[in-house]
Image (cartoon, rainbow, N blue to C red):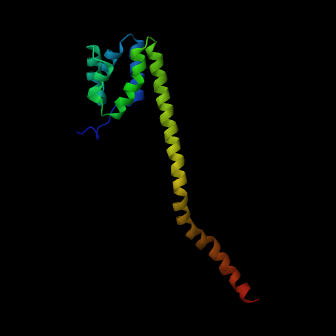
Amino acid sequence: MSERSRDYLDPALAMDLLAALLSSGIGLASGLQHIGTRFPQARELSEVGLRLHHGFSWQQAWEPVAGITEYQTLAEHLYFPFTAAVPSATVIRGAASSLRRHRQRAAEKRAAELGIKLVVPMGVCLLPSFICLGVMPLVITLFPDVMNL
């Protein structure tokens, strides 16, 4: 199965799962390994977690998944909690919510653009029927009266 045709674990869901694991006391590297082994869609994360656990740098650890957009997004959102001394679970939950809000706004924008793009085709399709069903009967009804003038 090619990488393009495969489904990958949603980054927001992965962040929520990681936040839950971090809240229970598991580290980020181990959390990535757990998610990678438990979810077939995220098996590459197991390799990333293993590399982090063995002391690879952040960039080196994420090299196996460099071409996968979903994991690039995940790596970007997890970099700060990994490098900073902050409560990671809270930061990761916030990042997951932010990612979902961003995707919601993008979907709403695409829906609005679609509505604008559909106005002309809808008008082209509906105008002839409006003329046939609305204007023509009125013209036919008024035509004899106009001819008698």
Task: Say whether residue 17 is left or right of residue 1.
Answer: right
Task: Say whether residue 9 is left or right of residue 119.
Answer: left
Which residue is at the front of the view, 15 or 80?
A: 80
Task: Say whether residue 90 is left or right of residue 148.
Answer: left
Q: Is residue 85 above or below residue 140?
A: above
- The residue lying at 31 percent from left, 23 percent from top is 59
Which residue, as the protein is rendered here, is positioned at the far right?
A: 149
- The residue lying at 54 percent from left, 60 percent from top is 120
User: How many labels sit on residues?
Assistant: 0
- The residue lying at 30 percent from left, 30 percent from top is 66
Which of the 4 image quadrants contains residue 41? top left
Q: Is residue 146 above or below residue 104?
A: below
Which residue is at the front of the view, 52 or 12?
A: 52
Q: Position of residue 19 (x, y in %)?
A: 42, 18
Which residue, as the protein is rendered here, is positioned at the far left?
A: 1
Q: Position of residue 33 (x, y in %)?
A: 29, 19
- The residue lying at 47 percent from left, 18 percent from top is 91
Which of the 4 image quadrants contains residue 47? top left
Q: Position of residue 105 (x, y in %)?
A: 52, 37
Which of the 4 image quadrants contains residue 148? bottom right
State which quarter of the image contains the N terminus.
top left
Q: Position of residue 76 (x, y in %)?
A: 40, 26
